[in-house]
Amino acid sequence: MSNDIALMVKGLTKSYGKVRALQGVNLQVQRGQIFGFLGPNGAGKTTTIRCLLDLIRPDGGMVQVLGINPQADPVTVRAQVGYLPGELSMEDNLKVEGQLRYYSDLRGNKIDWDYVRQLARQLDLDMRRSIKNLSKGNKQKVGVVQALMHRPKLLLMDEPTSGLDPLMQQEVYRLLKEARDDGATVFFSSHIISEVDALADRVAIIRQGVIVEEAEPQQLVSMALRRMQVRFKEAVDPTPLGDVAGVTLLSQSNGVVAYLQVEGEMDGLIKALAAFPVSDFEMERPSLEEIFLKYYKGQEGN
């Protein structure tokens, strides 16, 4: 595997009884990227991440993490990875610092505690409090700190901002970007569209165990539907606009305003509009949420 590639997944399959969780997942993540893995609950995100760490064994396919086969050498892989699971197991009777020192012991006590305290301050996490007295959001902060504390080469984060308020979500984004800027690769799963849009350099959408699209977030936006309102200088018949490839005439108002939906490239519509007395137009770009709904529309119950 090239030294430029942090994660390589080919033909990954996994079933739980009759349920096919992964149906041939293919992924390639470059070193130094923040890569968003987008999909609803049950799409296969967590199963993929657990296969990357050899926490579960796939039925088939190939996985390499930082150039290493995790099935052949899981200890070396996990030593270089910061992992935040969807549900982190912690000891209720320990204080936050004690819990973090336990994780440090597992990693051979090679932790910079000044850095740990800095992370805790940034996340407004009181290290003197007992785990049993923490809210879900504060437990999530402990999880984020333990994933980052040893400055890993690769971060695997399963829903990293789950339970956090908007201000803390932004702080986690900042920490992950700082880790990326320091040379780490970040692979995170999410079902929050705005999170992927704000954070990821590249994104893959998974549906029912299959990658249905992979691109930069802005590329996905450009591939999706747009809506346009066109205002004419005088009343016209805008019907011919609906005959342009990829264009649907949604409605019109007295021939003066036309509401259009455009899928794909804009070139054909722009050329068609040249034949009309256009006074103004407004275009609404889709959010990643709309793209997500486009990919999943009608699929939820399948």
Image: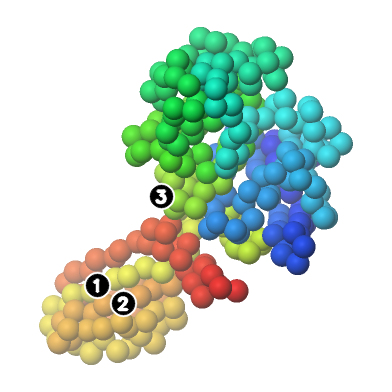
Identity of the amino acid at label 2?
A: Leu
Label 2: which residue? 260
Q: Is residue 289 above or below residue 118?
A: below
Local crowd size for mark 3, using a 10 Å CA cut-off: few (<14), some (14–19), many (≥20): few
Q: Is residue 75 visible?
A: yes
Identity of the amino acid at label 3?
A: Ser
Which quadrant would residue 215 be assigned to in this image?
bottom right
Label 3: which residue? 194
Number of the front mark, 3 or 2: 3
* Camera-nearest residue between 148 and 254: 148
Picture residue at 63% right of the left edge, 21% below the top: 103
Label 1: which residue? 229
Picture residue at 64% right of the left edge, 56% below the top: 44
Residue 299, position as x, y percentages in the image = 55, 72
Identity of the amino acid at label 1?
A: Gln
Left or right: where 216 falls relative to 29:
left
Residue furthest right in the image: 72
Q: How is the image coloured?
A: rainbow
Residue 34, position as x, y percentages in the image = 55, 39
Instruction: Looking at the image, tell me whether mark 3 or mark 1 is earlier in sequence order.
Output: 3
Q: Secondary structure at mark 3?
A: helix
Q: Is residue 113 above or below residue 212?
A: above
* Camera-nearest residue between 14 and 96: 96
Picture residue at 78% right of the left edge, 27% below the top: 76
What is the spatial separation of the Cα atoms under label 3 and label 1, in whole angstroms?
25 Å
* Camera-nearest residue between 39 and 275: 39
